[in-house]
Image: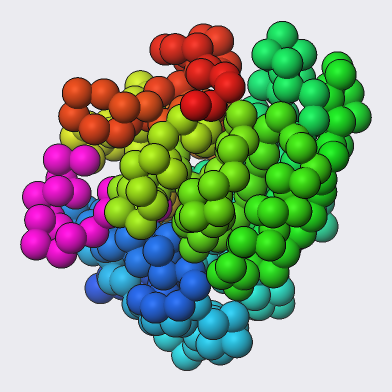
Amino acid sequence: MKKLLVAAAMVLAAALPARAQPAAPDAIKIGALYASSGAYASISFTCHKALDLWAEMVNAQGGVFVKAYNRKIPVKLIEYDDQSSTATAATLYNQLITQDKVDILVADSGSVLTSVALPIAREHKMLLLDQTGTAAKFFTPDNPYIVLTSAPSSDTWAGTLGEFLHDKAQGLGIKRVALLYSTNDFTGAMAQRIRDMAKDMPGVSLVYDQGTPTNTSNYTVLVNNIAAANPDAVIEFGYPPNDIAFLRAIEDGGAKFNYIFTVYAGNEFELLERNVSKAGMLQTSTFLTAAFMKYPVNYGLDRDQYRAAWDKRYANDHLEFGVNSIAGYNTGLVIEKALASADSMDQMDLRRAIMGLSGNLKTLVGAFRLTPEGKQIGILQPVGQVREGGEGLHLVPYYPDQYAETKLVYPRP
């Protein structure tokens, strides 16, 4: 009887049609926003062009390998200009999901324009590939629909500066610190990390702690107020327009500070160098991003190879090369690796594939490592100083010690 049953089952199985594989689409649709104008264009547009460059590279090779279809498929970017408007961005994120029905959703650069995507993606159960929206509050245990691809979270980022102050401030004679920050999710989170860490910094106290709207363009009064507090070190956290206006106000007003720190001198150096005088930039401190640090890679181009590809592709476009010029390309690499290992195009399968990269992927931005909430903690931002060399201004790291190529010049001349 057993033999008869087995034989019957085999006959029945042979008679049934094989399970059909899902039909492969003509393209993998990737939806993304960018800002060609407005307050965030300086960080958004080059990020957008970097994602475009990645897409051109993979399509030139026949597309990306998609495990779910066991074949290479071209990628199709569907991109809209939000003009730095959160209201416009919200409308366009919805359009990408509900009308364009993209397979993969990529956020615009920066925390402000990412913040409006967060609830929309969650509502539609769409995984949000967050390129550089680093606000720590974006990443919570109850929301699996976000992963940070190409920058460390703000608290991780600012932690390097806090560790420098903890380890070195007392020896340098830095006792009084002024903190000025733009009140947005990105730099506000940085300020909070420094504020929290300052409680345990030997001999260091915050003598000035002030937030200002992100659209602030005149820093004259703020710089005067900081000077009145007589700090040994001044930390300013803002977006590029904030940093530019802040450094200009210091130079125009003749204020002298022994230590000045801004965010974007080491993120978008070419942009700041074009808009701030040499004297205003010299000896300022900043975070050194992958635009200036060469990390070993196990996937994709390294920094020098990518810089050559960027310069060749955009030779006639006069685009600055900085961290955002790299971030969009790196997001593409994460997409590429995820599609190659995800069992299906289901959003949670894509997330599992990306989480599987954590601790294993090394790209030109550094080590890729995520918390269970999708927060990026592997990418390091050393602290460095703007110096003058034979070919003009350049950046040199001075902390942490394993990356240091110089000692901090303190006090700043």
Q: Any magenta on residue 323?
A: yes
Camera sees residue 125: no
Q: Position of residue 190 (x, y in %)?
A: 70, 46
- Picture coordinates of residue 178, whole percent (x, y): 75, 41
Asked if residue 208 is positioned above or below residue 45 in the image, the reply reads above
Task: Tell me which residue sits at (76%, 37%) in the image.
Answer: 230
Left or right: 372 as drawn, with respect to 4: right
Q: Is residue 45 above or below residue 278?
A: below
- Queried whether the magenta region covers residue 405, the answer comes back as no
54 over 108 or under it: above or below:
above
Is residue 259 toward the left or the right of residue 333 in the image?
A: right
Q: Residue at x 18, y 29 (%)?
A: 391
The residue lying toward the viewer, choosing from 40 and 274, is 274
Residue at (62%, 61%) from the top-left corner? 220
Whole-percent x, y for residue 60 in the image: 12, 56
Residue at (71% x, 29% y) in the render: 232
Residue furthest out toward the right: 199
Which residue is farthest front? 254
Q: Quadrant of residue 73?
A: bottom left
Stretch of the chain drawn in magenta: 307-324
Q: Quadrant of the N terminus?
A: top right
The count of marks equals 0
Which image quarter: residue 369? top right
